[in-house]
Amino acid sequence: MTRYVFKMPDLGEGTVEAEVVAWHVKVGDFVTEDQVIAEVMTEKAAVELPSPVTGRVLSQTGAPGDMVPVGADLIVFDTDSGEEADETPAAASVAVAVGAPVAPAVAVATSPAPSVSVSAKIAPAREKHHGRVMASPATRRRAREAGIDLAQVAGSGPSGRITRQDFEAARGGSVAPQATAASASAGALSLAPRTGTEEIKVIGVRRLIANRMTEAKRNIPHFAYVEEVDVTELESLRQHLNGRLPQGASSLTYLPFIAAALVRVLESFPQCNAHYDAERNVLVRHHGVHLGVATQTPDGLKVPVVRHAEARRLWDLSAEIRRVSEAARTGKAAREELTGSTITLTSLGKLGGIVSTPIINAPEMAVIGVNKAIDRPVVVAGAVTVRRMMNLSSSFDHRFVDGYDAAAMIQSLKDLLEHPATIFIPG
């Protein structure tokens, strides 16, 4: 036996440990070089670890949620078992399942049928994916939760990568018969009491979000300010511009207009486009506006960044907001695309409600929340009329942004949005 010890790698930027988010192999599995064996997470990003060798897994360190120091043993392989495993993959899988040594091929016939059938399905699928299932960490997590083996899912993406659509199609095909059977057997609506609990370990991105939200709320005294904005004229301009788009082009939402207006306003309120460096006790005011766009993803809330929003025109802003948001949702955003924002916009879209209380994305000074735009009656020039209204719910770091300045900034933003032509007129 030749043992190969793979240690937790140094993932850069001063990382001293990483969290095990998920194992994609288990003790006894035969893996090939470059096959994804685990997903780990640092304070900066999630990383998929490929196997450096071909062999059989002898041992692993850490369960999902455990922290493993950089340089510590992570997984141990037996690199002498490759040829034997290639000849009898099904037998090897069955032997591991029952805790026995690797059995010859004849053992498959006398082993329990379920183990044989699973092994037989996995092996051809692995060959189709050339030894590695290509999928994002979010897709892998959803597959584990749904009990779906991604090795049996055909990927339609580049190099056979399994897209979210591929997964949803596979999940729909796997759960639909069970749901139908359950509905047929249940008949009428059941009113029986439900008992028991479910424990969900907080790991990965959700743990990171929880920690950062707690730190932000504990360390930053939030000053909240809500203002209603008449966006009737902005809606008219938006509809006019969208009506001139070629067939199939992506339409403008409110966000690029708000982003363009915010860039203009920050010129007069530089204290809101800043970071607080707590270690040095220094405020760092940024000349460029690196706009964070809070985006809901299958893994939780992420904040991809539109770099230098001040240097982008309306259509460019719209395209970049859409690009970074989609990259975050699909798990394709690079590490540098998820860090470095100087102020954040957050919107719940059609679920925007009337008022929200957004939490500041530390070390920033402010976050602007966009609530739902609705038509409602208001009084204009002494008469009741229908206007399209939207609330902006903002939060500021009250240590460094006074309440007066926060209100003045939102009032300036309101003025631009209510007279949208002024957004594009040089000041």
Image (cartoon, rainbow, N blue to C red):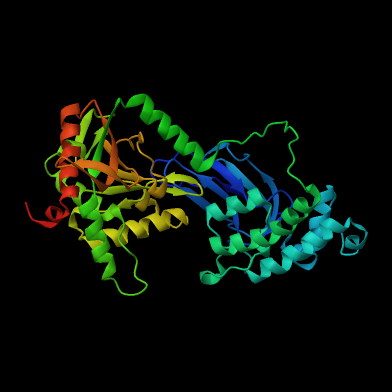
Q: Is residue 135 left or right of residue 153?
A: left
- Residue farthest toward the right in the current orientation of the protein: 110
Q: Which residue is more in the foreground, 210 or 95?
A: 210
- Position of the N terminus by quadrant: bottom right
Residue drawn at the location 73% of the way across and 65% of the way down: 123
Residue drawn at the location 75% of the way across and 40% of the way down: 190
Q: How many marks?
A: 0
Task: Give the answer, above or below, for where 139 lies relative to 353.
Answer: below
Q: Is residue 29 left or right of residue 306?
A: right
Task: Give the answer, above or below, for where 325 lies relative to 359.
Answer: below
Residue drawn at the location 53% of the way across and 57% of the way down: 136
Corner quadrant of residue 223: top left
- In percent of width and height, residue 88 lies at 80, 65
- In percent of width and height, residue 33 lies at 61, 62
The answer, for residue 133, to whether it is visible in the render is no
- Residue farthest toward the bottom in the current orientation of the protein: 247
- In percent of width and height, residue 85 lies at 76, 62
- In percent of width and height, residue 374 lies at 33, 47
Corner quadrant of residue 128: bottom right
- Residue farthest toward the front in the current orientation of the protein: 383
The answer, for residue 65, to whether it is visible in the render is yes
Q: Which residue is more in the foreground, 148 or 76?
A: 148
Q: Which residue is more in the foreground, 379 or 2?
A: 379
Q: Which residue is more in the foreground, 344 or 191?
A: 191
Q: Is residue 411 left or right of residue 30?
A: left
Corner quadrant of residue 273: top left
Task: Give the answer, above or below, for where 133 lies relative to 427.
Answer: below
